[in-house]
């Protein structure tokens, strides 16, 4: 890997776009050659068009990069484009890029449900990346679209995978307490969340009830066979900057003790192909044994924000297990996840 | 009711004690004649011993009242004592008061599980107050102990009662997002909750899984026959001053549509005996139809903090219904609840 | 005052517009006959066009009122219009209303600096209302424009007036810690203020350095002679819902002790004309003697949000006095202030 | 520097103690050989006695270290002790350690005012470390006590030094907005600060008005000659985890323009001796030119939390300049400052 692969970021000025830039700073394989943003920012230096909201400083190389339009012709230098576009724009633009030969690693929800589009968490379903081959054949694209799941589905699915593999998950109740950065910037008004909770996040519950079933599914000759799990989700917004908490009650094919579950979670490893990639979480799952962890402020940066943190594994009076999952929503659950997906694509020789 | 009934508050300087004082200010039936606090505050004027944390100002009559010890002999002028004591102190002290002839309306958890002690929400199980007669006979007390449930059980049980009456509740998943005032003062450190969630509240889950079963139970000749409902609870602390949110997924004896549930909730009325008391919530339950309500900051003061607010009534993929419940934890869920209980005692001629 | 005076609210759906509606609910003199909002809300019932953010519930009469355009012809039933318009719209629209015969009580900054427009705090400079006569003569208007100051100038000027009257204020350093509601809704993004401070509020410092000088000035034959005080202001946004704190260091014509200052502040009364109006603060100023008050959450509702609360009066090593001022920014500092101004206009027979 | 210098931490379980451990993890010169805490933690492994509140994980070596009592005999292996003791304990214990030959680098306020004790910010007054020689001679100690200033004085003094050197500071008004971690753990109750400001921090204003004068003073043959600057300070607590903001208005011997000030601040360098130490801030001062910076959440980690960040340099109507200073209160303003002091001691051959 002597030469770095040129990449671009679509939607570079937003909350997830900023995370892409921050995480790609110093990346061993990828080099950002272009940043694209909406019409009104086009032509401006990134530093003047972007209201940077991360506590890590804006990388120097990004400050002076001139924003280009989000069109294939403006990004010809890049081979991979990371998409932090809103879903409606992504719907129109991402296929244009894929057709033009770019590998689109998207954080948008627009194509997650397409049969031939991988919905990918490398530490969970690395093999689903083979859908890219089917996608190219079917659509006649030289590029491709790959997606990462919704930020709340992300950590939840990683934890469930470790348990499903061993015990056969059947039903799951999940209630999220989600961070503000998940709503983008400016996103949630401060007057709506100081001394408050918003007990609804538009469209989120449907995603959390559907996406894990695809990712926990098996890739067969006819595509992904969905996992036979039924989910019920409630989603809430709380006054936290980063880090989504999910409380889950889980039913398996057979009784599972907390000790068995902790063993399975702690021992879990990403599939071999995904294990040693630059963004691979180390470890994939960390189980904490304190009575009051995981907590967003204290635990979200575990494994540089890529590790799924699980705690409070205990018996459930109705199903088998209760537990709490924490995942960094803009790192593992968004930009970091897309980058990890891109690394898997490269490693599998599919770029 | 020409003459006011003299009452006292135990644990008067704490967070719940302050709510008692605030809610008893101008009460039509009760007049505070004594405030009791721990040894180190004894003999001081209330205003100088208490760090007042409510936004309603400290009533003038309370400012200059001298704190007395929490002993029956120090409170001889009172007939009812409202107890905001911590559970360990309540365990020792409350029976002394009951034996000495006081009606103890307690917010502590110490005696909630005793067979002959009513665990009471007047708008739910007003008839359970008859346990007081049994309690007096059995224990030889001229006074009595009555309890109100945990603040999280409170709103939840009110909402469930309306549904259980009509549809037969069987199983319930509940996840709380609880306010800081529930932990008392100083309670939760700011460093533990700013930009954070604490995914555990010690002892709370066991209470929420047990208490509603007693309150939804039937009072028979042998005491309360518990409701055959199974609960699974997860409890969380969030950065909210007042107002507990509970997300619930509910299974009934038969399918229930959201429309049926909303009708049952909206039509619900407290038992006749409890309906017109001074602290009775008006209405008992308010159903909101906005997509993002109830919210603690906006809805906690509904019905002067006594009304249970329900929203987001919708189908559940696993059970029958999902909904969100909000209740003011230090008014309906603590001090206001105890006062409402005392009013019922008086109205029933049991004082 | 048998018949109520018909009034309208411009900008009725915003944060200050909502406060107008809440404070006018049950007003003894005024009756809201129309609510005006921007084009895209026109024709809708208020309840469906407005995202209500106050914890007091939306008054029933407002829910169903149909929003009209902000034009004189649409508001013919009203005699007073309360303006919660943004400054740029206010600049164009308010004179149209004044010309058409309406008394405009404005919260906008657009005309505060005009020589013949009163910048009014009735408990400070009630006599400045006479500028209305001059304004009408000069501009040929049958109506008029009256303004209330910026929310940060408000409480500060009330406190300074009490001291200036007796000791002759010369120089003032003031640093504000301002609430979020001052920025309107959605206003400040939650990501900008959770675990953060924003050490600047655009345009605010210039207002705070200028406005008190007009209000503390004397009305002479040639208009207001500005008070010879020099101000230096720093303004900050903090994570508080309502209630602006101002830390001030003050220099007078002669040394003033904290005791003298407390006496002057406590004894201060509004001018006779302004003292008994429905919205008059009772008291005008409250001095607290605790070491850590005033605090926004605990003290902002003093005098139903109309009282200026002062605390921590102590010597200053550089000037003479240090003190802390608190004022409710959307009640005394915005909607409540405009209503108080309108009451004075009526009481003075100038409507 | 082949061998690492053995060090110990006093008060290791508290908020500042935790920062010491975190910052000493991997330190190139120092190796922690002992952790001391209060009686009730003695004998326990650090991990079980400490409620860790930092988002950086607890270093592995610290987890299993057994807590020892805070006595010289229990810490014989160490040469430097970092003191995070409360002031009252520090008063008694620190001299015992100095007498027994330890270099005490203290964060406590107990000895800051002693004539022969350096109050030290290496990038400001590195030469004051020579007081150690005087201290040893006078007190007959083989060890010594060195102190770092209060967290609010810290960043302020660094910024003022750059300006005082060139323009001669005479008077300063300063108002702080301070973070919660400055009050230790559990420190400020969440109920006191959510949706609130506390406009007083006990004892803080006196420190901020005094400490900079010693640090900006000249070391002469008779000790430190205090700088002839007069300060007026107001101190406030706000809902921020880490990072103190100070708003300052400054008067110099002559007019200073914002441009001159920015140049002086940006060009400022620590004295040569302090410039290349492991904990030296890089840069000493960063001037930001955005209208709304510095902000605690975004800027506190500048230079790994050691850099003083200045912004909003602008003219002042009363004095000459207004500006805003930000400094990380538990890194530069506490533990990091003490470590930087210790490094200077070693580098000067004074250990």
Image: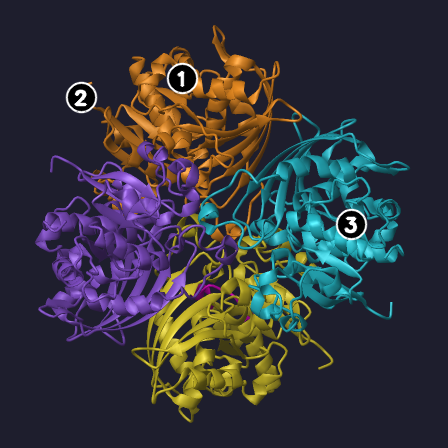
Chain colours: A yellow, B purple, C orange, D cyan
Q: Which mark is residue C269?
A: 1
Image side of residue B72 versus residue A40, left or right: left
Q: Which residues are magenta?
A: A81-90
Pointer 1 chain? C
> Compared with residue C340, is residue B254 higher up or lower down, i.e. above or below?
below
- Image spot of residue A151 (x, y percent): 46, 69
Residue C58 can be seen in this image: no
Q: Nearer the viewer, residue C331 or B86?
A: B86
Which residue carries the number 3 mark? D146
Q: Residue furthest top?
A: C221
| Other residues around mark 2 within 10 Å, as few (<14) / some (14–19) / many (≥20) | few
Image side of residue B8 versus residue D8, left or right: left
Q: CA distance from mark 3 to mark 1?
A: 54 Å
Q: CA distance from mark 2 to mark 1?
A: 29 Å
- Image spot of residue D13 (x, y percent): 61, 61
Q: Residue at x 24, y 44 (%)?
A: C45
Q: Residue at x 58, y 74 (%)?
A: A339
- Image spot of residue A282 (x, y percent): 59, 78
Which mark is in front, 2 or 3? Answer: 3
> Compared with residue B209, is residue C98 higher up or lower down, i.e. above or below?
above
């Amino acid at each position: 890997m002597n030469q770095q692969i040129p990449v671009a970021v679509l939607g570079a000025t937003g909350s997830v776009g900023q995370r892409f830039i921050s995480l790609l700073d110093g990346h061993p394989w990828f080099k950002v050659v272009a940043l694209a943003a909406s019409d009104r920012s086009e032509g401006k230096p990134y530093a003047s068009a972007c209201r940077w909201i991360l506590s890590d400083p804006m990388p120097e190389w990004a400050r002076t990069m001139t924003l280009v339009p989000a069109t294939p012709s403006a990004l010809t230098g890049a081979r991979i484009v990371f998409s932090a576009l809103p879903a409606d724009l992504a719907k129109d633009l991402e296929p244009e890029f894929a057709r033009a030969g770019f590998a689109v690693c998207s954080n948008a929800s627009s194509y997650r449900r397409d049969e031939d589009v991988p919905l990918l968490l490398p530490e969970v379903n690395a093999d689903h990346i083979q859908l890219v081959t089917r996608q190219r054949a079917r659509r006649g694209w030289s590029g491709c679209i790959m997606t990462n799941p919704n930020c709340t589905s992300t950590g939840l699915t990683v934890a469930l995978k470790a348990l499903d593999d061993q015990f056969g998950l059947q039903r799951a109740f999940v209630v999220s307490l989600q961070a503000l950065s998940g709503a983008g910037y400016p996103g949630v008004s401060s007057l709506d969340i100081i001394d408050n909770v918003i007990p609804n996040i538009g469209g989120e519950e449907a995603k959390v009830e559907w996406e894990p079933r695809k990712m926990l599914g098996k890739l067969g000759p006819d595509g992904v066979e969905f996992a036979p799990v039924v989910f019920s989700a409630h989603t809430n917004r709380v006054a936290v900057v980063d880090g989504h908490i999910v409380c889950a009650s889980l039913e398996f094919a057979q009784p599972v003790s907390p000790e068995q579950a902790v063993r399975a979670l702690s021992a879990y490893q990403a599939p071999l192909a995904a294990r040693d990639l630059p963004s691979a979480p180390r470890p994939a799952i960390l189980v904490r044994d304190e009575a009051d962890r995981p907590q967003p402020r204290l635990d979200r940066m575990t494994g540089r924000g890529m590790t799924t943190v699980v705690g409070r594994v205990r018996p459930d009076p109705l199903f088998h297990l209760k537990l709490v999952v924490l995942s960094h929503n803009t790192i593992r659950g968004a930009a970091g996840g897309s980058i990890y997906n891109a690394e898997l694509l490269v490693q599998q020789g599919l770029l």
